[in-house]
Amino acid sequence: MDKRTTTETPRQLTRRELLISTAGIAALQTAAAAATAGATAATAAPATPAAAPTGPFTLPPLPYGDNALDPVISANTLGFHHGKHHRAYVDNLNKAVAGTPYADMALDKIIAATYGVADKSAVYNNAAQHWNHSFYWRSLRPQGGGEPPAALRQKLETSFGSVDACRKELLTAATAQFGSGWAWLVQDGGRLAVVKTGNADSPLSKGQRPLLTIDVWEHAYYLDYQNRRADYVTAVIGKALNWGFAADNLGSA
Ligand SMILES: [Fe+2]
């Protein structure tokens, strides 16, 4: 095991614990546990220095196998999306924060500190995309979709009129987002709402609490659906959305 890896594991968990205070609570607790399990497994594996972490941030493992969401999202798409795109955000973030005070800050603090700051766009974009993707993986699950847990369903019915009306708003937001971005279910005060954001932005910057998200960057679906974003989003909402994750993220407000 590479020395850097063994000394980094506690640091990674601390960052995740800090993130938990803002949003994605259950997801990031699970991700931390998975990361610990992964580190344990890696200890028994042959050392691979070329793949060792080189910065304060690390790519979280997927909470399921590459083929677990097939046919909604293929193993090919998931492999590229997580292993190439998300990894690139993490690698570029590590390069961007090297030698700066951001290297010692929690991810959510970096996002808040660099949002809208023109000369920090590289830090912001990669930090936000790292956060968004970590949240997106947990927003999906194998054999997902279906009906939300009772507590969440009640809030959805209060805010949207019905769960199906919420599904339709998610589809509309995801397809109406021009270019790259995200569709989100959020908690805004005492109500739930659907919002969309462009590029790397998230509802965190507006003080809203993310409950789940759908990535609508082309890299999320193009290999499987080409330009048919609506088909991807419809399949995700119906067959892969993790309503339990959203319910776990509900705040007391
Ligand atoms: Fe993505």
Image: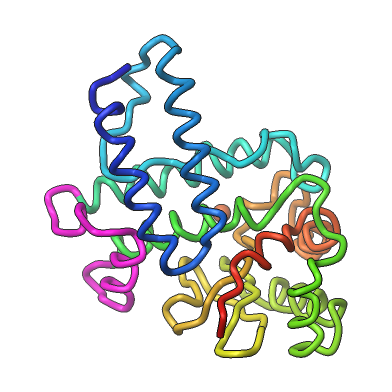
Q: Which image quadrant is residue 182 in?
A: bottom right
Q: Going 69% across and 71% down the picture, which residue do you hit?
A: 174
Foreground residue, 227 or 224? 224
Q: Which image quadrant is residue 81 in?
A: top right
Residue 155 appears at what percent x and percent y?
Answer: 74, 82
Q: Is residue 108 magenta?
A: yes
Foreground residue, 195 or 81? 195
Left or right: residue 175 compared with residue 187 = right
Foreground residue, 227 or 79? 79
Left or right: residue 46 compared with residue 121 = right
Q: Is residue 20 magenta?
A: no
Magenta span: 98-120
Residue 222 appears at what percent x and percent y?
Answer: 69, 50
Q: Which image quadrant is residue 128 in?
A: bottom left
Residue 36 appears at what percent x and percent y?
Answer: 45, 34
Is the residue 133 above or below the residue 183 in the image?
A: above
User: Which quarter of the rendered image does ligand 1 occupy?
Assistant: bottom right
Left or right: residue 161 compared with residue 185 = right
Q: Going 56% across and 72% down the picture, which residue do you hit?
A: 210
Count of marks, rendered view: 0
Residue 185 appears at what percent x and percent y?
Answer: 65, 74
